[in-house]
Amino acid sequence: MIRNYFRSAFRNIKRHPFISFINIFGITVGLTCCLLILTYVINEKSYDRYDKNADDIYRVTRIFYSAPNVESLHLSSIAPAFGPGLKLAFSDMKEMTRTLPDGTISFRYKEKLFNEQNAFFADENFFDFFTVPVLKGDGRKALTEPYSAMLTPDIAKKYFGGEDPINKQIILDGNKHAFTVKGIYHPFPFNSHMHPDILVSFSTLNDSTIYGEKQLATSYGNNAFYTYLMFPKGYTTERIEARFPDFLDKYCAALGAPPKLKVHNTTKLTAQKLTDIHLTSHLDDEIEENGSSGRVYIFSAIALFILLIACINYMNLSTARSALRAKEIGIRKVVGAQRKEIIAQFLSESVIVTYVSLLLAFGIAALVLPAVNHMSGLQLTVGSLISWYFLIPILLLPCIVGLISGIYPALFMSSFIPVKVLKGLFKVQTGTFSFRKILVVLQFSISIVLIVATAVVFRQLQYIQDKDLGFDKDHVLTMVGGGAVGNQFDAFKTDLLSNPNIKSIGRSSRIPSGRLLDDQGASVLEGGTFQPLKVDLKQVAVDDGFIPTFGITMAAGRNFSHNIKTDSNKFIINETTVKTLGWGTPEKAINKQIKYGNVTGNVIGVMKDFHFESLHQPIIPIILIWQPYGRVSIKVSGQNVQASVSHIRNTFMHYAPTTPFDFTFLDQKFDQLYRSEQQQGTLFTIFACIAIFIACLGLFGLSAFTIGQRVKEIGVRKVLGASVPRIVTELSKDFLVLVLIAAAVAIPVALYAMNLWLGTFAFRIDVSWWILAAAGIIAVIIAFATISVQSIKAATANPVKSLRSE
C-alpha cells in the first residue's frame, strides 16, 4: 500500500511537472526561510548556555529612584563593596565573582604598542563561573597575584608573535605598571554576553594608583562592577531578591549611610539570570549591545507566515487541478478504494513533496548562510540545526507541513461522487466565498503587512538620518586615549589649531551618542533654602571647547571661559531643565542658584535642546559642569579630511609617544546606535520580497490553471468580437478583487503592528496614509503583472484551435 502511495506520488509529479515545480519550489523557499530564521533563533536563545553553571548564575543589577517608585536609572553593574557583602549575607551562596571592564587602555611589549578595547579586571575565581577552556597555565591560580594577566591566543600572537607568552610582561599605560602573563584562555564563544580579550587580576585594583583597597571595600557609589552570584540548584530570582532590601539597609548603614535612612526606598538591587541577559536585558551600561526577544518573536512569526503562504499555494493548486484527477479518484472508488485510503494517498503525496523540499532547503540554506552572516554580522551555522534536540523536530516538520498543506485537498478530492465523475458531470466549484479564495486573500494579506513593515522601518531610519539633532555631528573626530596628553593639553591644543583645517577642540566626560548616566544629586534655591529636586539632572563634565566643537546653540547666557576662574563654580543647563524646574524662559534661568553634588553656583548659560542620546530616548534635563578632562573631540574642516587626521596623529604622537593614536568620527558612532534597526530593515525587505514571490508563484500557477480551463470561453468571446484588453480584464478581475480584499484586511493589522514598533522611539514618524495605500497598490500591480502573463497569452491565442473540437 505504502509503495503504491510513493509510486502514485512520483507518477503525479511527472505527469504535471509545471504545477509540481511550483509546489516544490514554493515550499522549498518557505522551508529555507524557516531554516535560516531557526538558526538565528537558536543562536539568540543559546547565549551563555555554553556555561555549565548557566542556570545557577545571576548578575546583580541596581535601580535608582528619583522619587518613590519613579525609576531614574537601572544599571547592569553595581558598586564594588556590594559583592563581598552579598557573599556574607547569603550564607548558602556558592560563589561570588566580579569583573571591571577598563574601557580603552594601551599595552606595550618592546616596540609593539596597541590600544585594547576589551581588557577586564577579574576575580581569581572567574573561571569557576565562566566555562572557557584554559589553554596554558592554571585558571584557578593565574589571577590570584596582583599584576598578573591572561590573554586570548590572538592577543598573545599580536604581542609576542611565535614566542611563548607565559611569564613575559606587558606594560600598561606608558611604563606605569608591568603585568606578567600567567595563562592563555580560549576566546569566549560568539554567543556570550561579554568577550574579554585580556583578563587582569582583580587584586591589582588594591593599588591606590589604579583604584585603591579602601575604595574597593567601602564604596557603594561607583557602580561600574559587574557582579555575578552562583546559587545552589532550585534558587529563583524572586527568592534572591526578597532578601535584598534588608541587606541594603544593613550593609549601607555599616558603610556609613545614615542609620535611619531606608536605603531600599532610594535604590534597589535585582537578580538577573545569566541566560536572560542577552535577550531581555537592555539596561544602562551593558557590557555589550544585547539582542531582543521581540525581534526573535517577530522573525519567528515571519518564518511561520512565509511557510503558511507556501502551504496555501499547495492547497490552492491541488484543489484547482482536482478536475484533472477526478476520473482517477472515481475509478479508485469504483474498484473498492475507501475514502480514508484516498485521503491517505493525497496526504502521503504532500508529505513526500515536503520532504523533497526540505532536502533542497537544507542545501540552499547552507549556500546562502555566509551571505546572511555578512549582512547581519552574526555567526550562524547550519550545524546548529544538526543536533538531536533540533534535528528530530526538523525531520518531523515535513509531516506537519505536509498534513497542513494536504488535508484540505485530500478531504475535498476524496468527497467526489464516482457516478458524476465518470459521467463527466463533475465540475470544480468556484463560488463567491470558496475556501480557495479565502486562502488567496490570506496570502496577500501577509505579503502586504510585510511590505508596510519594510516601508515604515526604512522611513523611520531615513527620519533618523535627516533629523536635526540640535548640534553638528559631521566631521567631529573623537579620540580614545586623549587623556595621555595630560598637563600638556594647552600646548597640544595650540599646535593643533595652528592647522587651518582644525576648527575647534573640546573635552568632555561623555560625548553625544552615549548614554547620560552620571548624576550627583541637585537642589535649587527656593525661598531662601535649597530644596532637593525630584528629578535627575544628568551631568556632563566639559571644558570651554565642548559647546563650539559640537556647534551647540545657546538659548541664553554664555559658554564657560577658561579665562574666568570662577566658572568652576558655574553651570550650564539645557532648555528641558528650565521647563522641568518651572523657570519659565531661558533668560529667567540665568543666575539661578543650584547646588549640584558638593558645588553651589549660578547658572550662566542655557543651551537649546539637542539629542545627546539616541532617538529611542527622550531629551532629558542636562547640566554641564566645568571640569576639563575626559575625551577629546576635534572639529575638522570637511575639506582634505585625510590631511587633517594625519596632522592630528603626528601632533598627538609628539605629546603622547607611548599611547597609540586611535579615533572615530562621531557620525559613525550615531550610525552604530541604529545598526540593529538597519539590519532589521534589510531583513524585512528580503522576507517581504520572498513572501510576495511565493504568493505570486502560487497566483501564477493558479491563474494558469484557471485560464486553461476557460480556453473555449475565451475562443467564443474572441469570435464574438471581444478585444484583447477586454478579455485580459475579464480574466484578471476576479483575482484582483481578492488582492484588494487582502489589502483591506492587511492595512489595519500593519498599522497596529508598526505603531507598536515605532513606540520604542521617543522621536518617530507617523505612519502616513500613502504608505498604506502604496503597499496595497504595489500588491495589486504585482498580482496583475503575474496574472497578465497568462491572460495575454490566452487572449492572443488563435480561437480556431480552442474551438476546433466544438
Image: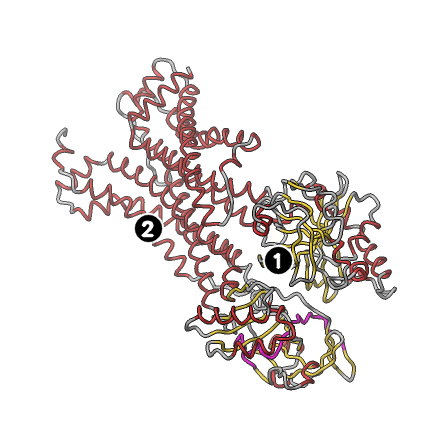
Residue corresponding to mark 1: 108
Q: Is residue 398 above or below residue 737?
A: above
Residue 58, percent from left and from top? 71, 47
Q: Is residue 87 left or right of residue 305?
A: right
**Relative to residue 723, is residue 106 depicted above or below?**
below
Magenta segment: does it hold 543?
A: yes
Q: Mark 2, mark 1: which one is toward the viewer?
A: 1
User: Is 414 drawn above or below residue 568 in the view shown?
Assistant: above
Q: Which mark is residue 712?
A: none
The quadrant of the rendering that contains the N terminus is: top left
Secondary structure under badge 1? strand
Foreground of the two, 252 or 33: 252
Residue at x 16% of width, y 42% of height: 796
Which quadrant would residue 190 be assigned to in this image? top right
Residue 650 at x, y = what percent?
52, 70
Q: Residue at x 16, y 38 (%)?
A: 715
Whether residue 367 is in magenta: the answer is no
Determine the image quadrant of residue 336: top left
The kind of residue on which mark 2 rests is Val
Q: Position of residue 28 (x, y in %)?
A: 40, 35
Q: Find residue 5 and report its image quarter.
A: top left
Residue identifier under label 2: 780
Q: Is residue 95 left or right of residue 153?
A: right
N-terminal of the pair, mark 2 or mark 1, is 1
Residue located at (44% from left, 20% from top): 340
Secondary structure at numbered mark 2: helix
Please give the range of residues in magenta.
Answer: 531-554
Instruction: Out of 40 and 672, give the one closest to the viewer.
Output: 672
Q: Which of 288/645 is in front?
A: 645
Residue type at numbered disc 1:
Arg
